[in-house]
Amino acid sequence: MKILSCQDLLDSLHNLSMQVKDKLWIATPYLGNWEAIRNILGNKWIDDGNVNVRLLTDISDYGGLNYESIKYFQYRGKIKSIIGLHAKIYIIDDNAILASANLTGTAFSRRYEVAVLFEGIDAIPLIELYEQWWNNVAEEISSDWRPKKPKKGLKQENDEMTHEKLPIRWELPIVPNKKIEWKKKFLDYESYLNKYSDLANMYNHIQRLWPKSPLFFEIDAFLNYLFHHAPGKPTKSNKATKSLNQKDKELEIRKYAHNFKKWIDNGSDGIETNERREKSSNKINNMLRKDRIETVSIEEVKQVIDQFNCMNSVPLNKTRFLNPNNNDLHAIRDAWKNLLFGMDPLAARMLQCSNALKYFGNSSIYELLAFYYPEKYPIRNSNSSSGLRFFGYDVSIY
């Protein structure tokens, strides 16, 4: 047992977190801004998908929770809530810190905080208490939960009521931000999926041109039509999200869905293109089955990426990806197996695949998931993102 305070507390937590191997479990009622958390804890727990990440907090006190930080913890692990939580606990592998400090920049840089560090066998009771709360007391929060806006006249304080009157006493370590920003492209995938599914469900109530084909394939064909073939190509130049209520969305989708049907009925190549999607999906499913993905050959890898629109549109990336100096066969097998069948949250697996393979970008990751699980995941590209924004869904420009 060791007493920690002030700079020693900050340094000890940072150093332990930077060496984490198995688990990072945190209990804190307040969750500060993301930049401060990244600097306090470092990057290792974010980059290493083998680290089990848990966060216990109190979502009833939403004024103390930073939304961006919540999303990062959701992306890397699981969050549960205990109404009335006041404890601050930091568990890193076999070490446990029981502290007065919330996980905020204010607590670790401006306040006089104190903590007790338990190591090895001494940490077991605190770890067991955390597990008991996690399994028997805490409640799971939905993936789309976000802090509410405070009532009029109340100010939301996401960093434990930082005041200029509190001077900075201890400087937070600076952790490079090089990898963090682009990770947000995966963080919003679940929100993107929900909005894509909403559009697909409304379209499905209007018409189905190929009822035996996966719905998402037909939606991809519909959005591709709007981007490349519809008169005026209405979604190609669309960058701002339209302001549409649910009724207006349905009217717009109905209007353009009927135009799409006419285009198909007039002999376009849409039917043939959709058949190619189905054949590609069947081919990829056969080659990358869970019981044979570990033995997939380099020739089969080539056949898989030959099905990707993104790889065919930039052939140089295909050549670079297949170059054994960039990606050896074992790395490809492991990355694809983890992406398709791993147990980590999807956004984490997408990130791990992106980190593991060179020249296998976001579009390739989205297409591999969509072709392997066509009933579950849509193809995500500029066509689909522009289409969603055109119909009033607020998604990022791809």
Image (tube, rainbow, N blue to C red):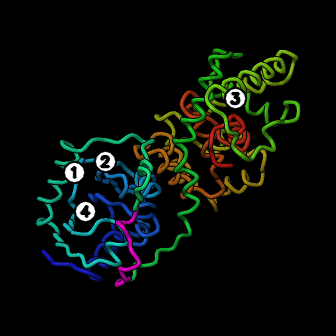
Q: Secondary structure at mark 3?
A: helix
The magenta stretch is 158-170
Are the residues at dot 4 and dot 1 in contact (C-beta closer than 8 Å)?
no
First along the sequence among labels 4 and 2 = 2
Which label belongs to residue 91? 4
Question: Is residue 137 a member of the stretch shown in magenta?
Answer: no
Query: In the depicted view, which residue is nearer to us: 11 or 277?
Result: 11
Residue depicted at 79% across the width and 22% down the height: 260
Nearest to viewer (mark 3 / mark 2): 2
Nearest to viewer (mark 4 / mark 1): 1
| Residue 26 left/right relative to 205 | left
First along the sequence among labels 3 and 4 = 4
User: Which residue is the site of mark 2?
Assistant: 60
First along the sequence among labels 2 and 1 = 2
Identity of the amino acid at label 4? Answer: Ile
Are the residues at dot 1 and dot 3 in contact (C-beta closer than 8 Å)?
no
Residue depicted at 26% across the width and 69% down the height: 101
**Circle 4 Cα neighbour tier, 10 Å, few/some/many (<14 / 14–19 / ≥20):** many
Nearest to viewer (mark 4 / mark 2): 2
In three-dimensional space, the C-alpha distance between marks 1 and 3, rounded to whole angstroms, equals 51 Å
Q: Secondary structure at mark 2?
A: loop
Which label belongs to residue 227? none
In three-dimensional space, the C-alpha distance between marks 2 and 1, rounded to whole angstroms, equals 8 Å
In three-dimensional space, the C-alpha distance between marks 4 and 2, rounded to whole angstroms, equals 23 Å
Are the residues at dot 3 and dot 2 in contact (C-beta closer than 8 Å)?
no
